[in-house]
Image (tube, grey):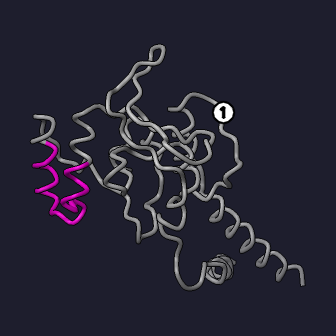
Amino acid sequence: DIEEFYDSLTDHKIKGSHKTVKDAIGNLPKLYPKKEIIRIGRAHVSHEQTSGEQLDLHIPRYHGVRDQKLFHEWLTHNMNTFTQEQKKAFYTKITGHTSNHIKYRNLEWDKPSPTIVAHLYKDGYMFIHPDSEQLRTITIREAAILQSFPMDYKFIGSNAYCYKMIGNAVPVLFAKSIAEAMYEVLKKKKR
């Protein structure tokens, strides 16, 4: 019955400490703002990797000067801890528009990641990278790792499509736990 399934699922929860953002993506190559924004073909490029192995889909979105200043202020003032009204006022200060919704949030090194959502394909401002020197939102590869996809998993399509696909996916390890819980319940039923 359904209670057995939920009990089995509870048994499959990861015991003890949860993986933090730093555990998941803290070792990836850093992507720093360029001294000058350049244009490559039709795309503007605002960040560069200065060392380390080049990873597939670990390329940040373009972030202009306004975004980089926004990220710097948000991160250095620890604005995740601000009230909702303060966060909305910050949005108005930056854009000149008002909103009833919070528009910005950064990931935090010492906490688990919030669930990656499909809306990430639009702008990523709810997934600001926690390093105040990188001044960017997360890459496709970082989003995938945070959703527990293995590092070698291939995503094919436009950047927007890849972000949306990752955000719509059930996290891999969560899907595995559900399957294992179902298997345990079905195995007991067969006996």
**Residue 141: x %, y % from top left:** 57, 46
Q: Is residue 114 left or right of residue 6?
A: left
Mark 1 lies on residue? 156
Q: Main secondary structure of the magenta part?
A: helix
Side of 111 where 153 appears, left or right: right
Q: Which of 170 and 151 lies nearest the eye of the viewer?
A: 151
Q: Nearer the viewer, residue 101 or 86?
A: 86
The x, y position of residue 85, in whole percent, is 11, 56
Q: Is residue 135 magenta?
A: no
Number of numbered discs overlaid on the protein picture: 1
In this picture, residue 7 sits left or right of residue 167: right
Residue 150 vertical position relative to residue 63 in the rendered view, above or below: below
- Does 74 lie within the magenta span? yes
Q: Residue furthest top?
A: 41
Mark 1 element type = loop
Quadrant of the rendering where the N terminus is positioned: bottom right
- Of residues 124 and 5, the one drawn nearer to the viewer in this rendering: 124
Q: Quadrant of residue 69?
A: top left
Q: What percent of the width, then of the height, locates residue 28?
A: 54, 54
Q: Which residues are magenta?
A: 72-91
Depth check: give the residue in front, 128 or 168. Answer: 128
Which amino acid type is shown beneath numbered disc 1? Ile
Q: Is residue 156 above or below residue 85?
A: above
Residue 189 position, x and y percent, is: 83, 80
Residue drawn at point x = 76 percent, y = 78 percent:
185
Residue at x 68%, y 68% (from the top left corner):
178
Q: Is residue 24 above or below residue 65?
A: below
Q: Quadrant of the C terminus?
A: bottom right
Q: Identify the residue at image location x=25%, y=61%.
A: 80
In the displayed structure, would residue 126 be above or below residue 180?
A: above
Q: Residue at x 71, y 74 (%)?
A: 181
